[in-house]
Amino acid sequence: MQRQPTYELIIWTLVTFSSLLCQGWAAKCAARDHAPTVQQTKIGTGNPPKFMVEVRNNCPMCPIINVHLKCGNFPQALVNPRLLKVVAFDDCVVNGALPLQPLQKLSFNYTHSKYLLRPSIWYFQCE
């Protein structure tokens, strides 16, 4: 009979913790600190240069979906459209708009003069 309060305490703790997960941590992912990032690294010494691009979901709790980059006049011929698809001038979508899991990186290479690539739109997919 004395075990019942223990079970109630465990259930209350689990409900409280899951509420924090859904509200507190998901809200933190919406903060500017967890926005996706794009890092470009020059690899090799060729002319034209070759760049490795990493797009990273910086949220430790939620996937991000429909990630769009400002990409100027990036030519589609430089990269597989499943990785980076040119939608319009200065609008490219990453990973076919499919989710990038928490802290996941997606990378691709291109050979050309450096393009300025930076996130413009994305959505957190928290439950």
Image (cartoon, rainbow, N blue to C red):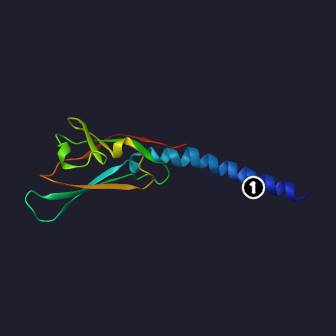
For the point 39% across and 51% down, which residue is it? Answer: 57
Image side of residue 107 versus residue 32, left or right: left
Name, please, the residue furthest toward the right: 1
Image coordinates of residue 100 in percent, x first then y, are 41, 49
Local packing at callout 1 (Cα closer than 10 Å; few below 14, some 14-19, many 20+) is: few
Counting every numbered tag in the picture gives 1
Label 1: which secondary element? helix
Looking at the image, residue 89 lies above or below residue 40 = above
Tell me the residue at 60%/48% (across/down): 20
Residue 112 left/right relative to 13: left
| Amino acid at the residue labelled 1 | Ile
Q: 83 or 100: nearer the eye? A: 83
Quarter assignment of residue 88: top left
Q: Position of residue 102 (x, y in %)?
A: 45, 53
Q: Residue furthest bottom?
A: 44
> Looking at the rendering, in which quadrant would you find the C terminus?
top right
- Locate residue 86, reporting x and y percent: 24, 39
Picture quadrant of residue 39: bottom left
Q: Residue furthest top?
A: 88
Which residue in the structure is indicated by mark 1?
10
Quadrant of the image for the N terminus? bottom right
Position of residue 27 in the picture relative to residue 39 (left or right): right
The answer to whether 46 is drawn above or below residue 97 in the figure is below
Q: In which quadrant of the rendered view does residue 85 lie?
A: top left
* Residue 117 x %, y %: 23, 47
Residue at figure coordinates x 63%, y 49% from the top left = 18
